[in-house]
Image (cartoon, grey):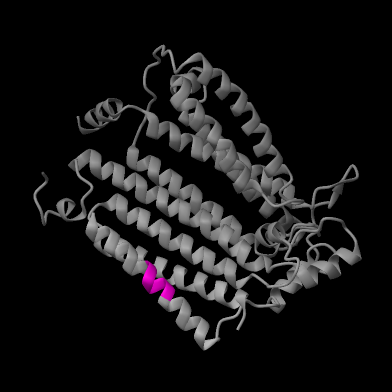
Amino acid sequence: MGRRLLGLVFVYSLALALALVVYATGSLQPPHEIKRLGVFYVEETFFGNMTAMSPEAVTAIVWDYRGLDTVYETAVFFLAVVAGLAVFRVSKTPPLKRGVGLTEISRTSTKIVAALIVVVSASIALHGHLTPGGGFQGGSTLAIAPLLVIPIFSYYALLARRLTPGLLVTLRGLALTAIGLVALLPVFKGLEVVTNIRFYPAYILGQLVSGSLLLYNSSEYIAVASGFAAVFLYLSFEEEFHEEERGEDHE
Amino acid sequence: MSEAGLVWSLLVGLLAVNLLVSVYGIIYGRSLTKKLISLTIFSDTVYVFFIMVGYRLVYPTVPPVYVELTRDQLEYLAKHAVDPVPQALVLTGIVIGMAVNALIGFGIIQAYRLKKTVTARELVGFEEVE
């Protein structure tokens, strides 16, 4: 224990010494201006000639100006989840049992909180082009709902409602196909891949939807949430079940 | 020489040490899980550096989001908003980082299931599994 404390003291002293050296040289000051590129994005995101029609500059960069990058990023995330599930090699789901779950108090409060999580996450995702947030953030929030349900009600509660890993992975595949389609559709009209405002309408029924940004955000929302939920479900299966699965693999 | 400069230097010092500690953890951590935790600390520290690069010291500092869709707001944001580029890069980085971490996590769980250990030296056979 003494050695750990000594290490901690040493590390903090090192940080302090480094900070004092940096301060004494006066070479590092917080900037008062941002880079020209940043100003360009802030100015162009809604009013400029190269507008993405989004009041939120970060979403505009992520899904419009650097949209191709994000499409690849989504592909990487998808492949990681698929690779993880492939490592587990679970082909079927455990047989349904009837569990009691935790106490009445925790079950009731979880029901209320889970409903709230769904609403908040949908708001984060669907307002992604207007306020800070977006598909990934909303999807990660939504994935908390099954993560809460699994320990409180047991994963049988999800399986009994047909929320199986197979369905979730299928949902994820469909949402990713939607992202790919939204990115590719402009090509058929002779435009570049991931074209936004020149192909998709900025306003629908008087509501600002920022072209493809809303479509990307909502698809990413479903993709991320179902991907995480599938992973959580696989991780919550009992170790005995995984052993049985492996045993059958070897035979 | 200002208070802001001192706080800035302190942040840089702490982050630099954070990087060192996480690299130490990645190299010398015995268990793969601890190596993974160190890796996440490393990447998170890099993200904070990114966000620092995009910060600007003006009053008030605002996020690059239009509160109202007017030309006045545009001029206000050009003078007060932080840089949106590092934020977008960090967002991409977080997603990729999480994908990689999840994959490594799966690998560690599977290694434990097959070999009943997550200690790096035991996994490669340099030490006996206890």
Q: Is residue A91 above or below residue A218?
A: above
Q: Quadrant of the N terminus of chain A?
A: bottom left
A195 or A131: nearer the viewer: A131
A247 or A119: nearer the viewer: A119
Report the side of A112 relative to A80 (left or right). right
Where residue A75 appears, as percent x and y from the top left, is: 53, 52
Q: Is residue A13 above or below residue A223?
A: below
Residue at the far left in the pictured view: B128
Camera sees residue A178:
yes
Q: Which residues are magenta?
A: A12-16
Q: Quadrant of residue A144?
A: top right
Report the side of A216 relative to A114 (left or right). right
Where residue B97 appears, as percent x and y from the top left, is: 47, 56
> Magenta span has A61?
no
Tell me what residue is drawn at x 52 percent, y 60 percent.
B93
Where residue A222 appears, as percent x and y from the top left, is: 61, 39
> Magenta span has A13?
yes
Tell me what residue is drawn at x 61 percent, y 67 percent.
B86
Report the side of A183 relative to A152 (left or right). right
Report the side of B121 relative to A226 (left or right). left
Camera sees residue B26:
no
Tell me what residue is drawn at x 63 percent, y 27 percent.
A115
Where residue A19 appears, as percent x and y from the top left, is: 47, 76
Q: Quadrant of residue A190?
A: bottom right
Look at the magenta stretch and give its main secondary structure: helix
A93 or A228: nearer the viewer: A228
Q: Is residue B104 above or below residue A165?
A: below
Q: Is residue A161 above or below residue A175?
A: above
